Image (spheres, grey):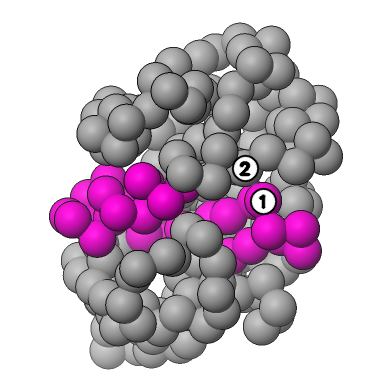
Amino acid sequence: MKKIVIIDYGLGNLRSVQKGLEHAGAEVTISKDPADLESADGVILPGVGAFSDAMKNIVPFLDSIHSYVESGKPVLGICLGQQMLMSHSVEGGFTDGLDLVPGKVERFPHSDLKVPHMGWNRLTIEQDHPFYKDIEDGAFVYFVHSYYVDTDDSHTLASCDYGVKFAASVVNSQGNVIGTQFHPEKSGDIGLKMLRNFVDMC
């Protein structure tokens, strides 16, 4: 059984992610101890809330996260967790991110569309990756966010359109760091399949 560690840094919907991963057949630990990453087969970086708060809270985990990524094992950032993977964000001023995936986090522009972007929207899968195995292009997933990720095509796994085209899912150059702006754990059977794919990657 694969051991997945969900990082608990004080901001995140941890229980629903835990249940989704357990449904996918993983042994799941919610941890506030950076040392727990050493024995993990996979790591989840969740997040709900403000980018600047998240980056302050994650400081004790920084060395462990970067060492873990360098080991080649898989990391999945969800929602704010995806945004934290990026180089920086404009939310609450200019704040540096983990810089595991190059790009920036921007606020949705003023338009007739409501912000936050909340509810179901369609994915366009941009490149092959084990995380999207057996997921059809055009699948609907569940979003809740006011800021979006802007990165280049080589780091965009899937895109979505909400007034602007944005990276709904990102990947690092090595392929082991993945982000989803949407919530797989709230996206029904399709989201559970993605979580199973992540467990299979571990």
Labels 1 & 2 near each other (Cβ < 8 A):
yes
| Label 1 neighbour load within 10 Å: few <14, some 14-19, many 20+ | many
For this view, does 128 lie left or right of residue 87? left
Compared to 94, does 54 lie above or below? above
Q: Which corner quadrant of the image does residue 161 belong to?
A: bottom left
Residue toward you, 8 or 128: 128
- Magenta residues, start to end: 170-198
Residue 176 badge: 1
Disc 2 is placed on an element classified as loop
From the viewer's perspective, tell me whether residue 128 is left or right of residue 21.
right
Question: Residue visible at 60% across and 22% down?
Answer: 40
Residue matched to label 2: 74
Helix, strand or loop under label 1: loop
In the rendered image, residue 71, in percent from the top left (x then y), is placed at 79, 35
Q: Which residue is drawn at 70% across and 23% down?
A: 61
Along the line of sight, which residue is nearer the eye, 73 or 187?
A: 73
Name the one closer to the observer, 114 or 161: 161
Taking 145 as reference, is 155 above or below it?
A: below
Crowding at mark 2 (Cα within 10 Å: few <14, some 14-19, many 20+) = many
Of the numbered discs 1 and 2, the one sitting upstream in the chain is 2
Going by the numbered disc 1, the residue's amino acid type is Asn
* The stretch drawn in magenta includes residue 74: no
Q: In this view, does 67 lie above or below 129?
A: above
| x and y, in percent, of residue 16 in the image | 25, 33
Q: Is residue 47 visible in this depiction of the protein?
A: no
What amino acid type is highlighted by mark number 2? Pro
Q: Magenta segment: does it hold 186?
A: yes
Q: Where is residue 199 in the image (x, y as percent from the top left)?
A: 45, 40
Say which quadrant the N terminus sits in: top left
What percent of the width, then of the height, locates residue 162? Answer: 36, 83
Q: Quadrant of the C terminus?
A: top right
